[in-house]
Image (cartoon, rainbow, N blue to C red):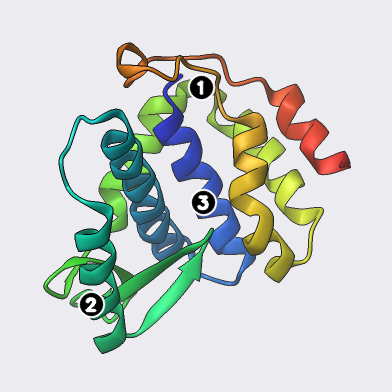
Amino acid sequence: MNRAPVLTLWAAIVAERLGHPPDTALSLASYVAGTAAQAKARRLGITEDSDGARSKAEERATKKRETVRLLGRDIALAHDEDGVVLADVGDGKPQHSAPVKAYVEKAFGRRLAEVEAAMRELAASLEPDELNRVGFHLYERFRPEVPADVRGWGAKGELDLGKVREAAGS
């Protein structure tokens, strides 16, 4: 399994634990996973977007907009045509949740319920604010192991649900 859908599902579960409705949670989770992928691409030299320029642009965007913090990321918010709060993908455009949901369902297939249950159990083991504070570090403990070099970009690893369950006990 690729790491991106694992982080997306985990971030959505954390967002729900913080009180966000499912559609908002999926939208926010997509932003978290996307920024993690961008950071890895910069680290591997796949993209040339400088951290300084990116962080300044994000700072300007979030200063002008309503934001929420999820797993260490400040996410600018937008509203869809029905007024649902979603992540802003740029220029006030909302990240709709339907494609994110379909992506997660396809990635996990028949194992989705099992993985989701283990992650929800982990999320329930901590108070919401603490979960949000340490949630990304928890993810790093159970994410699929893949090579760290460029050949590992997009590589699949095995998601060990035992590691998810162990994280709940620590």
User: In the figure, residue 115 lies in which quadrant?
Assistant: top right
Q: Amino acid at mark 2?
A: Ala
The residue lying at 71 percent from left, 52 percent from top is 123
Mark 1 vs 2, N-terminal side: 2
Indicate the position of residue 140 as horizontal and vertical percent values: 60, 37
Judge the density around disc 3: few (<14), some (14-19), many (≥20) Cα neighbours within 10 Å: many
Q: Nearer the viewer, mark 1 or mark 3?
A: 3
Secondary element at image label 3: helix
Secondary element at image label 1: helix
Q: Looking at the rendered structure, which numbered label has been put on residue 61?
A: 2
Residue 83, relative to residue 90: is it above or below? below
The residue lying at 82 percent from left, 32 percent from top is 166
Q: Looking at the rendered structure, which numbered label has been put on residue 11?
A: 3
Residue, disc 1? 110
Indicate the position of residue 82 as horizontal and vertical percent values: 24, 78
The residue lying at 40 percent from left, 34 percent from top is 4
Number of numbered labels in the structure image: 3
Q: Amino acid at mark 3?
A: Ala
In front: 14, or 135?
Answer: 135
> Would residue 1 be visible to someone looking at this image?
yes
